[in-house]
Image: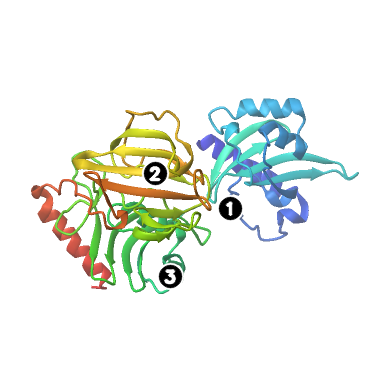
Amino acid sequence: MKRRTYLILALCLSVLSSCGPRGRVIVGPVEILPTPLVGFIPECFDADSTLVRSGDSFTVLMNRLGLGASDAYALTQRCEGVFDVRKLRAGNPVQAYYETAPGGSRRLCYVVYAEDRVHSTVFQCADSLAVWRVEKPVEHRRRVTDVTINSSLWNDMIAAGGSPNLIMTLADIYQWSVNFFTLQKKDRFRMIYTESVCEGDVVGIDTVHFCLFNAAAGKEVAAVRFDTGEGGRSTYWDKGGESLKRMFLKAPLKYNRISSRFSYARKHPVTGKVKAHTAVDYAAPTGTPVHAIGDGTVMRIGWDAGGGGNRIRLKHARGYETSYMHLSKYAPGLKVGSHVSQGQLIGYVGATGTATGPHLDFRVFQNGKAIDPLSLNSPASEPLDKKYLERFNAIYDQYMAELNGN
């Protein structure tokens, strides 16, 4: 690694002294430039920007940028252990750097493929072939954010300085205890977390250390990240050491809307008849993943002749059953008798059967009786072992003091 660093530095200094005005050569006092992240001086080359196209292979992309077929193939061999050429993603940005001869001909020298906001891969295409990964500096910031819902969690989170990534992280943490489809005005989230920042932009949420959810109706749910230190991973606990994990998830899919609620007298949108609709309909695009809300066994899988289209019915412990209808397709490998785990992919939203548009018809039964999925009182998991409670309570108090500015 040190040898690579010295080589890159030598390359930068040698190019800097010979690339003309674009290399920022200064007569007199010498300006010391930091070693460029990409390992060469971009200012010494003419640059073109493009995107990976749908259907592009690595070789096709390189050919289009100006690298010959034999060199493109040889470069794929250099990628071994550095970059998986099969993971080239359509839409990702690419920068190509060229040397331009006096006559106007151009030679491709470097290609930089951005994998995400932080990580890129550099392909050296001239003189010799080489591949290396680069990473932009990332700062990790601890933040306290307070969000009260006035219009929507998305809008109010952004207004409070939070990020969409934080919303998705909170949805994962509270997936057993807070239904994000039914949030109300004046519901409040206060949280302490660490985020990753690159070039001034938030690129990820490292850890949510603590969150306190206060519903306008009076419900309060804390989420304290706590590690017992016994080799298990950190999990989230409510005040007093109650596990946030429950027997069932609050919803079988994410980030969509409820189009129809549980009712014993609903006018059917297709037939026009007034009848019971003992389900919650989640409107979502075709292909949206659907997950089992709890551990269970597949009771039925196949076409529902009553208008439900492609349907899966699961049997759970304690007399519970769940039904998922109008699916466009099922997850591979499922059949009657298959065991599924909580959160496991079981199918995809569709509009099969009697439906006006793509949605998931979701139903819950307890001992054969239909119950409103939105009012399902999911049994709790085991609480935190009492031997950890003193340390846990101390951490809880510290977080509350930090939230309150003490």
Q: Amino acid at mark 2?
A: Tyr
The residue that mark 3 highlights is: 156
| Image: 348 above or below 259 | above
48 left or right of 369 in image: right
SS of the residue at dot 3? helix
Asked if marks 3 and 1 touch (Cβ < 8 Å), the reply is: no
User: Between 395 and 316, which is closer to the camera in this rendering?
Assistant: 316
Using residue 293 as the reference point, say whether residue 255 is left or right of it: right
The residue to which callout 2 is attached is 324
Check disc 1 and report the residue beneath it: 34
Q: Residue 223's mark?
A: none
The quarter holding residue 171 reads bottom left
- Residue 128 percent location from the top left of the image: 69, 30
Q: Secondary structure at mark 1?
A: loop
Of residues 233 and 201, the one nearer the viewer is: 233
Amino acid bearing label 3: Asp
| Rendered location of residue 146, percent (x, y) | 35, 70
C-alpha separation, residue under disc 3 versus residue under disc 1: 40 Å
Q: Quadrant of residue 29?
A: bottom right
Q: Nearer the viewer, mark 3 or mark 1?
A: 3
Task: From this view, report whether residue 240 is shown above or below residue 253.
Answer: below
Left or right of 400: which side holds 359? right
Query: What whole-number distance in Å separates the C-alpha atoms at marks 2 and 3?
Result: 32 Å
Mark closer to the observer (2, 3) = 2
**Residue 170 at what x, y percent from top left?**
35, 57
